[in-house]
Image (cartoon, coloured by chain):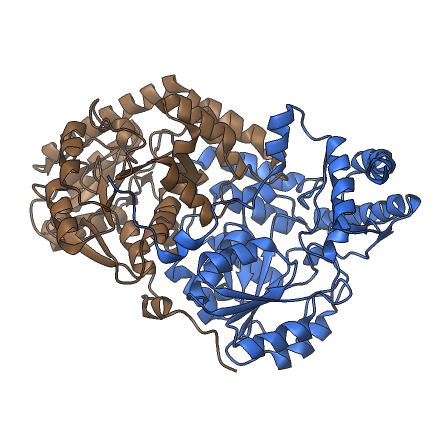
Chain colours: A blue, B brown
Amino acid sequence: MTGPRYTDIVRALPASVPFVGPEVRERETGTPFAARLGANENVFGPSPKAIAAMQEAVHDIWKYSDATSHDLRHALAAHHGIAPENIVVGEGIDGLLGYLVRLLVEPGDAVVTSQGAYPTFNYHVAGFGGELHKVPYKDDHEDPTALFTRAKEVGAKLVYLANPDNPMGTWHDGALIRAALDDLPQGCLLMLDEAYIEFAPDGTAPELDIDDPRVIRMRTFSKAYGIAGARIAYAMGAPDLIQSFDKIRNHFGVNRIAQSGALAALQDEAWLTKTVAWMSEARDRIAEIAAANGLHSLPSAANFVAVDCGHDCDFARMVLNELIERDLFVRMPGVAPLNRCIRISCGRPQDLDLLAQALPEALAAARS
Amino acid sequence: MTGPRYTDIVRALPASVPFVGPEVRERETGTPFAARLGANENVFGPSPKAIAAMQEAVHDIWKYSDATSHDLRHALAAHHGIAPENIVVGEGIDGLLGYLVRLLVEPGDAVVTSQGAYPTFNYHVAGFGGELHKVPYKDDHEDPTALFTRAKEVGAKLVYLANPDNPMGTWHDGALIRAALDDLPQGCLLMLDEAYIEFAPDGTAPELDIDDPRVIRMRTFSKAYGIAGARIAYAMGAPDLIQSFDKIRNHFGVNRIAQSGALAALQDEAWLTKTVAWMSEARDRIAEIAAANGLHSLPSAANFVAVDCGHDCDFARMVLNELIERDLFVRMPGVAPLNRCIRISCGRPQDLDLLAQALPEALAAARS
């Protein structure tokens, strides 16, 4: 008996899985992490109103979700001053990125991103047979000019830019990105990943006409709104582009409880303000802890801080492993020169107390 | 400014959306349906233990879900007497169908299904450019022999068979399907949709070697386990095929609360037994109501009953619309000759009281 006949693309894809969560080590060691600072989750949790809304929604879980996420889309439209037709809701930015790549990328099509930027975008581009071109970061920032120049050179259909950036936490003023759009080649779509935008200074989000066909923006409820496990995010853009998602998406892919939780979280602006303040305090504290250990940390507009371990990738990885040994879940960038850093998510004071205790030990162990 | 450059497949896809939920009419009329009997949901709801598990899981919603659904997969493996490597968990059968089609189907590849079977499968095949071949139902049953014969004729990579069937509720003995597999051509995968299997008589699920590379089976927590809004289902098959999903799937697509709810639902076998009994009573009651109105209803092994309205599609649609006018959410098959029927999901006694009241009125209105 022969097996299934996979597509050419699938046969060429690596079998290895880039997505290893903290639960894998927790199961191996039988010990839960003492602080969960590796996935840029929101350790402070969502609004209590969102918790209450989700617990209430559990009672209706026998019903399918609303395939159009009507109530949430309308609330988001009002929130952003745009039309519901400018918004599609999906299974996290990861899910929406997959759909977007599928809409545009045929085998061999050129796509541009930064060397060391979000790996899941690269995963989806490879998954549809796209040809990925990468430009280096410039002084630890993604480089819009270099990205758009390369897009022109290779005739890219799609270019990825995160603002603020992950994994470095750096950001550009929105006006700079808006001005750089003049250099985006015709027929190339800018995918602007704004997963961390709520943590960033005013002016970081570029002012753009939402019907501008050159840009699609994505935002999530996983970070500032604190419901990463709910898997819900949204894309904003021109109606034609947004409606094209309906041609291919899993219409009933979003969980009903997630829809309720996202709506309640969006409406609790006071909790968002508190969350952003807590994250800001935590960023400062991480920088202080780094400085107390003689390490430089990068300014961040996100809910994490990249700490420069001061040497090469091997040294940073040793520090990382020593922190993990001490039951702190942290991660690091995957590509040089970014991978001289480790990336530490903002934690509660008690989480960062553990970091303050473990970091000197981890550095000493890595140096010895 | 030009817009994005879509793929050839996407440009050829229809913009219309086949997925219209009951909420659309509820919003239009401002009135919620009095009985929700159109989407084969489980009106009795999930196990109270699953409700409790989901409410508890809300507190950890700030954490990403486990991308491997480890605990659920291991529990499912024990439940079925297979290995965790035989199981992949995904965003409903709809989501898993999309991944499966993507794994196998390149533009122009042949796929076979039945004329009038699950439209979402067809949606995914079209979405990846596959060429869909359809064989007719035989006496209101999907016809494995005809399906596999056509698969051989057209060199299909994939053939879809639901057992029990949706929308007719009919079923085959598992031994018949197992025997028919001898006629499945080499290199053609059978997608066996068992969404309704828990409601079916013993022996409906074919006894197959789980490592048999010719078959993938899909099951869901949306029907018997009553958490349709959670969007969680699983596929079972040979490890090579199951692992190939990891090459392309949205690894963090499944909601964390859904994982907890599915695990708790699976473990409450007493509730499942009760649910199956309630559904069986509801099937009998629907048949009685139909008979009292002079209508024949089809024997069903699912949580719904196809009621033959005794005339053509136009008449059945009138009856359907009259029921909807009376705030009963019901649906009907989309293709002749199946669409002489309307499909009524099993409801609670109070839901079926409403049906008993509305059906004579609807028939009278349709006849006049």
Q: Is residue B214 left or right of residue B233?
A: left
Q: Give how far across and how far down residue B13 sits, in percent.
A: 32, 66
Q: Give how far across and how far down residue B226 sits, in percent.
A: 38, 32
Residue at image location 50% in from the left, 72% down from the top: A157
Residue in front for this viewpoint, B171 or B234: B234
Residue B141 can be seen in this image: no
Q: Is residue A344 above or below residue A159?
A: above
Q: Give how far across and how far down residue B272 sits, in percent.
A: 35, 22
The extreme front residue here reads A368
Q: Is residue A67 above or below residue A366?
A: below
Q: Give how far across and how far down residue B104 sits, in percent.
A: 32, 52
Residue in front for this viewpoint, B176 or A274: B176
Residue at image location 57% in from the left, 75% down from the top: A151
Circle count: 0
Q: Is residue B21 above or below residue B345?
A: below
Q: Is residue B175 left or right of residue B12?
A: left
Residue in front for this viewpoint, A353 or A320: A320
Q: Is residue B169 left or right of residue A54?
A: left
